Image (tube, helix red, strand yellow):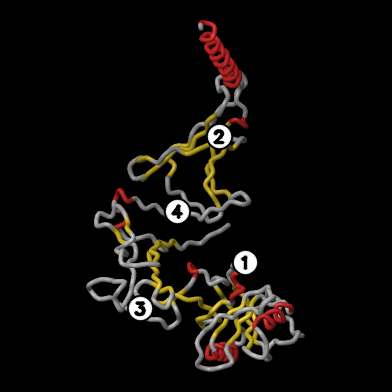
Amino acid sequence: QKHRCRLPLMLQALRACAIATILGAVLARPCTREDIRYGFSECHEGPPGAGPVREAFAYAEDCNLAAKNSTVLPQPLLDLPCEQPCEFNHYLRVKEDFRSSKLKVSCVPCPRGQFSLGGGLYVDGSNGDWSRPWPEGLKTSCLYRSNDARWVLGGGARLTCVLHVNSLALETRAGTWNQNLADQTLDVPLQILGNEACESLQRNFTGAAVLVIRGECPFSTKTQNIAAAGAKAVIVYNNLYERPHFYPAAANGTAPSIPIFMVTREDGDRIKTERTSAGNLFLRVASTRCSLDRREVAPGAQNVSTDESGPSWEGAEKSCAEWGVDPSGTFLHSGDNHNFHWLFSFLTLSTRFVR
C-alpha cells in the first residue's frame, strides 16, 4: 500500500520539477525583438478637456527582461485619444520605431484577406443610448408573408425582385435556373436584340446584358445563344400586353450558364423608349437569385396603414411590428408580432464594406 501511494507522489514531483526547469529556462532567456508584443490600454478619463484617453505600450512574452543582453522596452505613449479614426481597409497599429526606439501609432493597410470598415459605432444600452437618435445607416424593418405567399414589407408595401435600367425601376421574375448559378450583383451595360435569338448570333455581347422578346423558341435556347455571344444575363420581355409576370423555366435537359429575368411587354417598351432618349442603357440587379434580403419595394407600391387597434393576422390589413425601443432606452425588442406566422423583424446597418 505504501509503495502504491508513493509512486504517484514521486511522479508528480518529477513532473513539477520538469515544468519548473522548462519555465526557468524560458524565463532565464533574454528577450529579443521577436518576443515583444504591443497593445492599447482600456479607455479612461483623461486630462481636463481631453476626453477619453488610453495608452499604447509594449510588453514581452515568455522571456526575461532582466536577463543579460535582453532588449529594452520602449516607453509607453500616454494620453492617446480613444477616438482616433482610420479609413476603411486600414486599422490602427502600435509598433516600435527601431531607429528612434519609440512607439509609433499609425493607420496601416489591412493584411491580405482581412478587412476593416473604418471608424465604428458604439451604442451603450446601459446609458439609454437606444432612446437617442440612432447612428446613420442603422434602421429597423419587418416582413410578413401574405395570403398569396408574397413577402410584404411592414406597413403593407410588397417586396419583389427589381431591375434598374438607368432611372427605370422594373418589377421582374428570375428564371428557375438562376438558383443553380452563383448569386451575384450585376452592374453591366444593356443592349437590345432585334430578333428572338432562336439561332446563333453574329453580334458580340461580351460583358453586357441583353433584352430580347419572348416567343418562337424556349427560354433556354434564347439564353444559350445569347450566352455564346458573351453576354452576362438575359432579360426577356413578354410578347403580349396586359399579362402578369411569370418565371422563365428551362427545358428538360438544358442548363443555361447565365441568369435570365422576365418583365412585362409594357416594361420592355419602356426600356426601348429609354434607349431612344438616353442612348446608352445600364442594368443593375441586386441579386441574380432575387434573394429575400435584397428584394425591394415593388415599383409603384403604396404603404397600407393599420388601424389604431394594431395589426392582426386575421384582419383584412396585415402588417408586422418593427424593432421597438424600451422606454428606458436600455434594450430593443422585436415588437408585438405574436399574431403572425412567417414573418421577420430585423435591424440593418448600411455602411461601406471593403474586403
Which residue is found at the position 59% from the left and 77% from the top?
175
Q: Which residue carries the number 3 mark?
A: 303
Q: Which of the 4 quarters of the picture holds residue 333?
A: bottom left
Viewer-side label of 2, 3 = 3
Q: Quadrant of the C terminus?
A: bottom right
Say which residue appears at 52% left-offset and 69% top-offset. Answer: 291
CA distance separating discs 4 and 1: 31 Å
- Amino acid type of the residue that numbered disc 4 sits on in the rendered structure: Gly
Q: CA distance from mark 2 to mark 3?
A: 56 Å
- Tell me the kind of residue under disc 3: Asn
Task: Choose the circle earlier in sequence order: 1 or 3.
Answer: 1
> What residue sits 60% from the left and 82% below the top?
235
**Looking at the image, do the residues carrying marks 1 and 2 touch, with CB atoms under 8 Å apart?**
no
Q: Write down the residue under mark 1.
A: 182
Name the mark nearer the viewer: 1 or 3.
Answer: 1
Dot 1 or dot 2: first in sequence order is 2
Residue 120: image tag: 4
Residue 41 at x, y = what percent? 44, 37
